[in-house]
Image (spheres, rainbow, N blue to C red):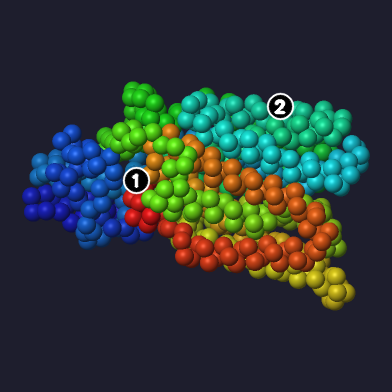
Amino acid sequence: MAATLPSSAAAPALLLRRHTAASLSSRCRQRWQRPAARRRDDPGAPLEIRGARWLPPPAPTGCSGASGATPTAEAAGEAPYRGSEAQGSLWMVLLATAVVVCGSFEFGTCVGYSAPAQAGIVSDIGLSNSEFGVFASVLTIGAMIGALTSGRLADVLGRKMTMRFAAVVGIFGWITIYFAKDAMMLYAGRVLLGYCTGVLSYVVPVFISEIAPKDIRGGLATSNQLFICSGCSAAYIIGALLSWRSLVVVGLVPCAVLLVGLFFIPESPRWLANIGREKAFHASLQKFRGKDYDISEEAAEIKGYIESNHRLPKARIQDLFQRKNIYAVTVGVSLMIFQQLGGINALGFYTSYIFSSAGFSGTLGTTLIGIIQIPVTLVGALLMDRSGRRALLLVSSSGTFLGCFLTGLSFYFKAQGLYSQLVPTLALCGILIYYGAYSVGMGPVPWIIMSEVRISWIFSINMKAIAGSLVTLVSWIGSFAISYSFNFLMDWNPAGTFFLFSAASLVTILFVAKLVPETKGRTLEEIQALLQASA
């Protein structure tokens, strides 16, 4: 099916081909035409035009698709119409995404491991509840260290080598836990796993955003959260069948697959362009877009952006808090804080304990969570590039508010001796609603926005590593604070704990409605311009 685009009198109409991945490109979008004199890749254009995205006035709209420019159009002095950046072969993009999300699956298994393993570890090793609380939360200590080093590692070693390094650290972590005979070995293995997840939580979404065409970037980036949920679900479900030592295999497999799979995919073209490997940059971009796809405009766009950043003075960490940048910092950091204040890692690490405290079977409860997380996250992936990031965040945070409120209500009824037969059911419904809502939006979207904002950050390339690490570090600090304090909060007041989480979700709704920008369907350079305009 084809549609025509408006054109000048000297140029015939251009035909649009429907994208082969039609579901993500079927909606209508605005179409623009650029005068040749203002093309950003024109050697005679000023640096500020070549280095930043040119935003032309809107023209009549047409249905989405992609087409190449006809010779007549170029002869008429018009820029070639590129249409959807997703045009061309997508198989390498999909293969690369499938490989790197093994790191996301590893992330999920590390987070989900402690809940089903709690009873076995406490029994076999003889840990007290407080010692097991340290074992569960010490994962975040390693993740903080990983977050601090992840940005620099990714920029110095490259995205692929950084993921290889993280996978090797993860393998050593799982082996240490498998052979653990006391609490210290358990803690050491858990710290190594935390470092692995801290690095992967940063580099995986960044790599996906750097290789994905803009029309499907949100959907592909959501696969990060989908596989985190899948790993967590696998740990919950398989953990109900295996001993805690045997469950280690669930974490070892994705590390091995990631190590092998990275040999079959190209490096990030944006990273290659940043370090000046021109030939490798073009080869990588061509592989990701298909051998017959014209990458000249996209390559010029990436190079122009990098060249303009390299001409800027070397940035310092305090530059993050300058007036022109504070909006981007506020959005990235605040979303990570609200993600953790909603209580996700408290529920993730202590799911079985929460269900048992409410009078429901911990094994059955964790299994049900494992079953619902994957299909709900798939729904979120399908909606990501249709409804937009902000809409999903608003719906998701509303759902986490309701889920925590119902769970808190169940503990309140239990403490007051009211509706005792209703308490377990109410707790189950509340937690399932929470997990379902979180998986749709608050789980994937902050990481997607973080990767988009991080890549399109106003600073030089060197500062982006610091900025990305800062956001990831904040996330893990929040995770540690919530997961470590959860046992103490539950001893203080179980109902009050979940009411606090629900209040945090309510504040999240207000924050998203007022401050979070919509990044759906925008290129990374357009996001940069949006952030500058909002500063």
Count residues near mark 1 (Cα–Cα under 10 Å), then give few for <14, some for 14-19, many for 20+.
Answer: many
Q: Residue furthest left?
A: 10
Given the image, on which type of amino acid does mark 1 rest? Glu
Reply above or below: 219 against 245.
below
Given the image, on which type of amino acid does mark 2 rest? Phe
Task: Give the mark nearer the N terminus: 1 vs 2.
Answer: 2
Quadrant of the snapshot with the N terminus: bottom left
Q: Residue 261 location, x and y as percent? A: 55, 29
Count residues near mark 2 (Cα–Cα under 10 Å), then give few for <14, some for 14-19, many for 20+.
Answer: some
Q: Residue 520 location, x and y as percent? A: 41, 55
Query: Which residue occupies 43% across, 54% down?
Result: 327
Front residue (pair 134, 377): 134
Which residue, given by chain and number where applicable, does mark 2 sit on?
172
Query: Which residue occupies 15% across, 54% down?
Result: 7
Quadrant of the snapshot with the C terminus: bottom left
Query: Which residue occupies 23% across, 59% down?
Result: 58
The answer to whether one can see residue 181 in this image is yes
Q: Secondary structure at mark 2?
A: helix
Query: Which residue occupies 36% across, 48% down?
Result: 528
Q: Secondary structure at mark 1?
A: helix
Q: Are marks 1 and 2 in contact (CB under 8 Å)?
A: no
Q: Residue 350 location, x and y as percent? A: 77, 51
Q: Residue 337 location, x and y as percent? A: 59, 53
Q: Residue furthest bottom?
A: 418
Residue 243, picture quadrant: top right
Which residue, given by chain and number where applicable, does mark 1 sit on?
525
Residue 433, picture quadrant: bottom right
Q: Which mark is residue 258?
A: none
For the residues labelled 1 and 2, the Cα–Cα distance comes to: 39 Å
Front residue (pair 4, 204): 204
